[in-house]
Image (spheres, rainbow, N blue to C red):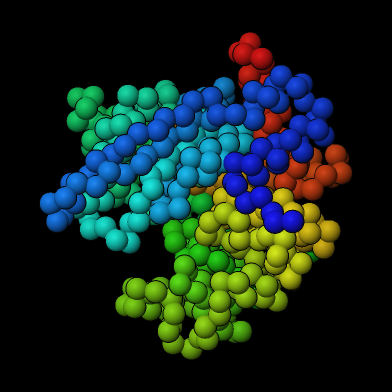
Amino acid sequence: MNENLNPFAIAQAQLDEAAAVLQLDPDMHAFLREPMREFHFTIPVRMDDGTTKTFQGFRVQYNDARGPSKGGIRFHPDETIDTVRALAAWMTWKTAVADIPLGGAKGGVICNPREMSSGEMERLSRGYMRNVARFVGLTQDVPAPDVNTNPQLMAWMLDEYELIIGHREPGVITGKPLPLGGSAGRTPATAMGGMFAIREAAKIVGLNLQGATAAIQGFGNVGSFAHKLAQELFGIKVVPVSDEFGGIYNAHGMNYADVKAHLQRAGKLGGCPNTEPVSNKDLLEMDVDILIPAAIENQLTAQNADHVKAKVVAELANGPTTPEADNILNDKGIYIIPDFLCNAGGVIVSYFEMVQNSYQFYWDEAMVNERLDLNMTTAFKAVHDMSVTQKVDTRVAAYLVAVNRVAEAVRLRGWV
Ligand code: GLU
């Protein structure tokens, strides 16, 4: 039988499993299975050739019981409303497991940024914000970057929002460039948070990180910083890395600066000196200590999970592992750091960015990282301890921690 790869069906199935362990009240369970609100809209964009193209945009506010909803905006040709729903659900569990006072949301636009000019991207970003301006805001819903969106796009969106409301309000969006109120350490934050989680997992599985090997799938903001930080902080040897075109490999490890310099020259990883090509498929099955999926969802499936040889899977992507793959990896004794724990560093520093914007007082990068470490380590321990006491795998444990917290807020508000 083919696996169901619909990300929202997967997100709901994961919740169902946790609800059964928790013996969650059925009314609460039914409420938490669905997004609270979602918005679908069209974004007409004047293209460089004079034509107007209409893009489809989404914003899903999954749950805001614990605070204003929070989550990135993804620009992707394969975006669907169900992907955005799943990502918004995972944001809800992410902010809860990280114990920051925010809910979960996500945005998306069906588009292919690779085929668009900078001017077209600016007009699309501003058009997105014109559509969502009426229902985002510091106390409602705060967007951020995600796949294919970056600080420059956040700057255009912030500017559009402030033009509409007529005053400065930098905290309406995070992941901004520093001169517009961004936070030190926000760009590497997701990867940095993942490193703290890997450090904690290594203690549990008895892995010496100095000289350990890692495979990284994805070389966007998260994957590339994961390479840099794994090398610099721990002396991990990154053996293969990949982008959407394929991977590169060197058994002795690849120096981040060399790979980055090649990427800047060539526009893709392929052809990097002193490396051999490797497919994205083979990368996942390589004999390494740590596997870091840092691209998109549904990469570890029933088809390939049995071939994974890593001791630790650190999910820096959202939703990289299907439920069937999850069972296979757990049966093999692989330690999984589940996505909404492993990649919470981004939204944790986004929260710090909102705090700094509110206080108009800015921290240095050392302060940001120190606080990030504290949040990540506390969240990691809560999940690990839950998995030990409840005798469940780490993903179910992360759900138990998160769902308990969200359900408590929902109950206190008297919604269910
Ligand atoms: N897009 C990131 C994530 O999936 C960050 C979200 C945010 O900072 O709001 O966690």
The percent position of residue 128, horizontal first and vertical second, equals 31, 38
**128, 314: nearer the viewer:** 128
- Of all residues, the one furthest to the bottom in this rendering is 274
- Of all residues, the one furthest to the top in this rendering is 414
Q: Is residue 17 something that shows in the picture?
A: yes
At x 74% / y 35%, what residue is drawn?
16
Q: How many marks?
A: 0
The percent position of residue 259, horizontal first and vertical second, equals 44, 76
Q: Is residue 94 something that shows in the picture?
A: no
Indicate left or right for 415 with 115 as reference.
right
Indicate left or right for 226 with 137 as reference.
right
Name which quarter of the figure residue 240 lies in: bottom right
Indicate left or right for 275 with 327 as reference.
left
At x 52% / y 83%, what residue is drawn?
277
**129, 33: nearer the viewer:** 33
Q: Quadrant of the N terminus?
A: bottom right
At x 44% / y 58%, what residue is drawn?
221
Name which quarter of the figure residue 213 lies in: bottom right
The percent position of residue 140, horizontal first and vertical second, equals 42, 24
The percent position of residue 29, horizontal first and vertical second, equals 71, 26
- Of all residues, the one furthest to the left in this rendering is 50
- Above or below residue 285? Residue 17 is above
Q: Quadrant of the C terminus?
A: top right
At x 37% / y 25%, what residue is drawn?
135
